[in-house]
Image (cartoon, rainbow, N blue to C red):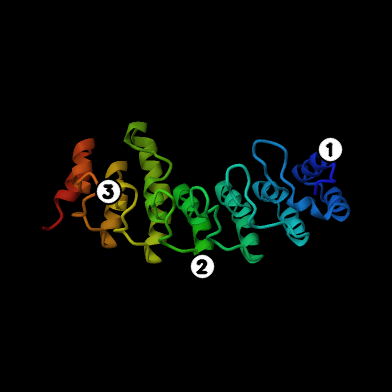
Amino acid sequence: MGNIAPETIEAYFAAIRRRDIKLLDRYLATYPDIVSVREDSRFTTTGLHVACALNDKRMILRLLQAGAPLTITNGFHDTPLMTAVHAGHSKAVQILLNHGQHPDATDIATLRTTPLHIAARNGDAAIASLLIAAGAAIDVRDSSNWTPLHQAVIGHGSFDYMGEGPVHMYCHLQMRVLTLLLRHGADPNARGWRGATPLHEAASVNCTRILRLLLQYGADSTIRDDADETPLDRARRREYPEIVAVLQSLPG
């Protein structure tokens, strides 16, 4: 790989971004090792990462046929599969899974975030379903001890301070992926960062729909986190009257 000129590498990546399949074929035929080359930028991405970000089926298939590595990571510690999941490209995700990419592939050395964590956080039930069908672990932990269910509750941090509209939109987006995870056996009482359960996090995002869904699947409202708070304690501290009312209405 060291004998490939920088200008050739630059042109190779440009061909992928232009979706020029004929030019790509010429580079792959002349420089077989170029599929493993990282782009000289802060993203240090490979051609397969770029093709997955573009959701270009022809480019992805051609690179895979040429031996592009599935597990190589970019500057964000993302595999090509994680890049596709981040972008919400279900077509690219399915192609990679069909070509043997393990659904839990991650960069173990860093955040240990799996593709299912990402899909859950993004509220992407379609991609989460593909990953689960391929054998993704439901209760896998990241470096913060979060499961995908925790991440689905937390989402992108659309908490109450962002205003009622965004919170309600956030709840709507996350409900499908939450339901999917719970139906596939996700533990509603898994303890994550600082001992918080998904119900603790639901009490923090001020969404009664998520709260009720977790309770429906057996979430325990009496569990205390590492700060000795129950979900009700959190809701009271944050002054969320609707959440408080739901939790206070529970028997016992």
In the visual, does 205 lie left or right of 69? left
Q: CA distance from mark 2 to mark 1?
A: 41 Å
SS state under label 1 = helix
Q: Which residue is mark 3?
A: 200
Sooner in the amino-acid sequence: mark 2 or mark 3 = 2
Q: What residue sits right under mark 2 in the picture?
A: 135
Q: Quick one: SS at disc 2?
A: loop
* Horizontal side of residue 173 vs 214, given as left or right: right
Please name the amino acid that badge 1 sits on.
Glu
Q: Secondary structure at mark 3?
A: helix
**Residue 49: percent from left, percent from top:** 67, 48
Q: Nearer the viewer, mark 3 or mark 1?
A: 1
- Image position of 117 (left or right of 153): right
The quarter of the displayed image where residue 218 is located: bottom left
Closest to the observer, 202 or 76: 76
Give the class, few, some or many, for how many residues have Cα within 10 Å of label 1's Cα (few <14, many ≥20): few
Specify few, some or many for label 2: CA neighbours under 10 Å numbering under 14, 14-19, or 20 or more.
few
Asked which quadrant contains residue 66, the reply is bottom right
Q: Which three-letter amino acid code belongs to the residue tagged 2?
A: Gly
Name, please, the residue furthest toward the left. Answer: 252
Circles 2 and 1: CB atoms closer than 8 Å: no
Picture layout, residue 64 above or below residue 52: below
Q: Which residue is mark 1?
A: 7
Going from N to C along the chain, the mark reached first, 3 or 1, is 1
Q: Amino acid at mark 3?
A: His
> In which quarter of the view is residue 103 placed?
bottom right
Q: CA distance from mark 3 to mark 1?
A: 53 Å
Looking at the image, which residue is at 30% across and 47% down?
Answer: 194
